[in-house]
Structure formats: structure tokens, C-alpha cells
Amino acid sequence: MVAILRKPATRTLRKMGLTDRKRILEAIESLEQNPSQKGADKIEGMKNLYRYRIGGRRIIFKRDGNDVDILGIATRGQAYDVRRLQQLDKD
């Protein structure tokens, strides 16, 4: 599987500190190997969105065939904003 980082996710990664960035990138590599692993849960009410928790942050992604499409990285409070999730789910 291949992980595709969308622009919002890349932008967030650039703003993070080195330690957080390293943890997130390791988690993305782990999702590439097994997107169905423990902790990668479907977001309630969304058709095709999943989340993966890394400390206080969430990786929001879609499974697209053999690819993992990383749509965003957000703090817990931002990750579950309904309007934002609905917009991501449309794409």
C-alpha cells in the first residue's frame, strides 16, 4: 500500500515540532503496512473516513483501493468538527 499525503496534511506536518512530526510519520508508515490495524477506527456518521490516534492528534484518512489517502492531521478538538469532516468525506 502507498500513503498519499494531501496538502492540508503536509502543511500541518511542516508546522509541527521534530518529535511530533517523527511520531506522525512513523504512524503513517504503519498505516501503509496495515490500514486495518487496532486504533484505525471508522468515524461515526461518515461513509469512508477513518481516524488513527497519535497522542493528542488524529490522522484523518480514507482507504482508497490499495492506497491510504491522508486527508488531514488535527488535534482532538479539531478532528471531529462535523462540517470539516463532511467536506473531507465528499472529496
Image: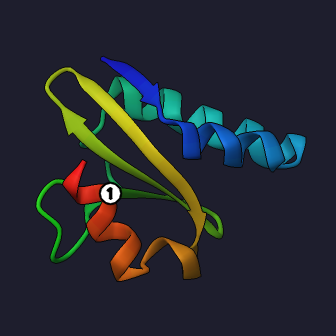
The quarter of the picture where residue 9 lies is: top right
Q: Quadrant of the N terminus?
A: top left
Residue in the picture at 57% in, 46% down = 8
What number of labels is visible? 1
Q: Which of 38 and 80 is in front in this view?
A: 80
Residue 76: give x, y in percent of width and height: 56, 76
Residue in the picture at 50% in, 51% down = 72
Q: In this view, does 11 lie to the left or right of 72?
A: right
Q: Which colour assignment does the render follow? A: rainbow
Q: In this view, does 39 lie to the left or right of 11?
A: left
> For numbered disc 1, what is the local secondary structure?
helix
- 87 shown above or below 36: below
Q: Mark 1 points at which residue?
A: 88
Residue 45: give x, y in percent of width and height: 15, 76
Q: Nearer the viewer, residue 80 or 22?
A: 80
Residue 70: give x, y in percent of width and height: 43, 40
Q: Is residue 30 left or right of residue 22?
A: left
Residue in the picture at 32% in, 52% down = 38
